[in-house]
Image: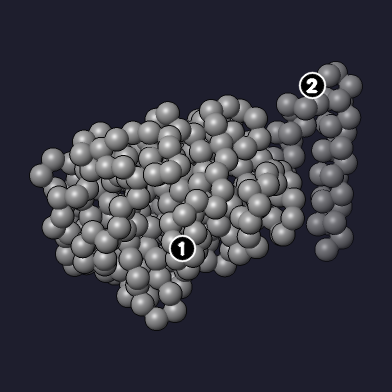
Amino acid sequence: MKFKSNVCLSAALVSLALCVLLWRDGRYKARAKSVFNFLRPAQRQLYKLDAGWPRNPGGITGVPYDVAVDHLNSLVYVAQRGDNVSKVLVFTEDGYFKTAWKTDTLEMPHGIFAVTDEKHLKSIWITDVGQGPYGHTVKQYSPSGVLLKTLGTPGIAGSRLSPLQFDQPADIFIKEEDEIYIVDGDGGMNNRLLKLTDDFSLQWTLGGNGTKPSQFYIPHSVAMDDVGRIWVADRGNKRIQVFDAMTAEWIGTWDSCFTEDGPYSVRFTSDKKYVVVAQLNISRLLFLAVPPVGAIGDCNVVNTIQMADGVRPHLVDVNVETSSIYVAELGAEQVQKYVPL
């Protein structure tokens, strides 16, 4: 024991001496950081790949852009694009293909979200960024793919709020069907976040193309946490912005975690401890520590999953019961499932 203590003390003294020397010669910031990184324990992995999901990889016939989990029925909805393919596929959580929607009302699905309550799945919402007669809309479907509601003016890109018009709406998040949050758009004329009530009337909106707080450049994903904060993946600005759900007040911004690539997704793990972020261009998933109620502080990367080059993870969803994470991957043209360790 005495020998181990002496070794630890010697290592600490050596590290301190290195930091002092590096500080004195003006190279402290870069090199001392590498010293501390060497001494810091390796990250403990939080998730592992379920290599057997889906059971039949050939079941995904197009390019998957997003996934939505119906945790009540253990189903996974995959929104995909491609010629002569169903735009929505349904799998069991075990990975078995279940069904494909037969609808011609979808052109280019982007975001997909499953609305559930304590007893049953209510509906599936999809953002459509197509340029044809059904595009620039946000649509509500039954679980079997019957169109129930269309928000926006089909086939017409615009910025009007009454009636609603969208230009390539990217993502939607719904809290118990009485709070609807939409980020609009995925590279179009609009760079805004909208909140609608349960009767689809506008409660508030904010945004505009820019880099200031409450401005966006390609807002790509939106989610709400358990303490009333709205999180937006401000993709083009390489940052996440956070707002008060009631007042739309800007709470804070995270950007230091995204110097290599902007955030494409924002979802929360089932225990609400981490924000799951996909970085498409560097094929990486980040797990960021969720701060308590109030100011969000600086972002803190707790864990990463580095995928192979060219996988290109786009949007993700989380099963709130099992904690499993599903990732829609554009480059690999697949959906992968990660399970907690």
Asked which secondary structure carries label 2, the reply is loop
Give the alpha-carbon distance from disc 1 to disc 2, as whole Å.
Answer: 57 Å
Looking at the image, which residue is at 49% across and 65% down?
A: 178
Task: Tell me the kind of residue under disc 1.
Answer: Asp
Viewer-closest of 105 and 204: 204
| Residue at the spot of label 2 | 27
Q: Answer with the quarter of the image where residue 59 lies.
A: bottom left
Measured along the vertical axis of the image, is residue 191 above or below residue 252? above
Measured along the vertical axis of the image, is residue 301 above or below residue 92? above
Viewer-closest of 177 and 93: 177
Relative side of 106 to 287, left or right? left
| Residue at the spot of label 1 | 198
Measured along the vertical axis of the image, is residue 42 above or below residue 177? above
Image spot of residue 39 (x, y percent): 72, 44
* Colour convention: one colour
Asked which secondary structure carries label 1, the reply is loop
Specify few, some or many for label 2: CA neighbours under 10 Å numbering under 14, 14-19, or 20 or more.
few
Image spot of residue 193 (x, y percent): 52, 43
Residue closest to the far top: 25
